[in-house]
Amino acid sequence: MFLGCIAPLRYPGIERSAWAVMRRLGVKIHQIEGFSCCPAPGLFKPLNEKTWLVLGARNLSLASERGYGIMTVCNGCQTTLSEVSRILKADRELKEEINEFLSSIGRRYDKDVTVRHCIDLLYDDVGVARIKKTVKNSLTGLRVAIHYGCHYLLEAKETGKNFKKLEVAERLVEATGADVIEYTENMTCCGAGEGIKSGAPGVALNVASQKIKSIAQARVDCIVVICSFCLLQLDRSQVQIENFSRKFQIPVLHYLQLLHLALDSVPAAMLGFKSHSIPPEKILSRT
Amino acid sequence: MKSKVPASPVRYYQLVGFRSQELELRKLLTNDGRKVVAGNVFETGHSVRVVEEICNLRKEMGLPSLPPTTLVHLDSLKEVRVLMKKTGVSEVVSE
């Protein structure tokens, strides 16, 4: 399991839920020691593409030398690791160049690593039917807005999926018993990626605000995301918006937290909502 | 007919949503924010800083106070720093 930065250092509930959910569904995941930031695609790639490739390849090499694949819980990590893996697979010369850098720290990246987003692993390998069967605490009546996030949609597009008719997250949310509620800006960005949050915070907030307004009109109980960075943006932005305009108070959680809640009657403290800016009261009443 | 790009980059961003690579908005960005984040990675191996409250929350949840990454394995952090120096990004960060 590759956690990246935001999940373990801002929303540890995602990490806790990932372990619990995968164990419950019989998926073997391992902790690999010594990973770093993926590194973040929107920040490192424009700054220095070689660094982006080399640090990505170092992370891949840690999994590769143990013969493991990688599961991600963040769209940014998924993009970096899968893209670096794809690029190096296609370009032998570049791979050798990257390996030259890695040799300075005594590493080498040879065997290709499969990189998969946790929701693809749940959808394709575990399957919606098995998840439905395993649910003990059905979330019937919970109104959920889904936010995919740009990097997942881009990768879906690049790998030939019909990204306008994606149903992965929809079916996975429905498997918990919750209702998926449509809203007008469901395919737009959270506003954080591509370095926007750090480079143009006002713009990032403006984009998030548009999205959250659209979600508020759909009168949902919560927003479910599949990316730790989108979670940070949609959760924390609501507090910033509240400071100068409107109060939304729509809880935001990662799909793994929602599924954790549905699979077991888990104590609220184990979901890590303490680090979320918007308290998910309607969700906590289900624990 | 070729579709018109709206004058406001913000609106354009909202319209294209997922096509972030094609953003007009990119023109607004400088490397300053990126350098800060890269600096964090050079120091800790991660893009965000460690916060004590989160370390405590991790412990409450039965997780180690820090994830077993470059934050704990200093030999791994050393590797990241060597690679950042060799690829030249550490110079950009300290500019």
Image (spheres, coloured by chain):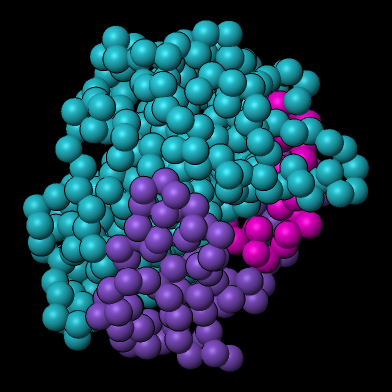
Chain colours: A cyan, B purple
Position of residue B25 measured from the top left corner of the image (x, y, whole percent): 70, 56
Reply above or below: A21 against A5.
Answer: above
Q: Which residues are magenta?
A: A194-215
| Quadrant housing residue B76 | bottom left
Question: What residue is at 18 percent from the left and 64 percent from the top?
Answer: A61
The front one of A257 and A85 is A257
Residue A131 position within the rendered picture, expressed as x and y whole percent measured from the top left: 31, 17
Residue sitting nearer the eye, A225 or A44: A225
Left or right position of A270 against A206: left
Report the side of A283 relative to A243 (left or right).
left
- The answer to whether residue A205 is magenta is yes
User: Which percent across, then down, holds residue A143?
Assistant: 61, 15
* Residue occupying image coordinates x 27% and y 48%: A1
Question: What residue lies at 35% left-to-right and 58% top-to-bottom?
Answer: B64
- Give percent across and percent down for residue B68: 30, 63
Front residue of this view, candidates A84 and A32: A32
Residue A173 sits inside the magenta stretch: no
Which is more toward the observer, A57 or A33?
A33
Q: Is residue A30 above or below residue A106?
A: above
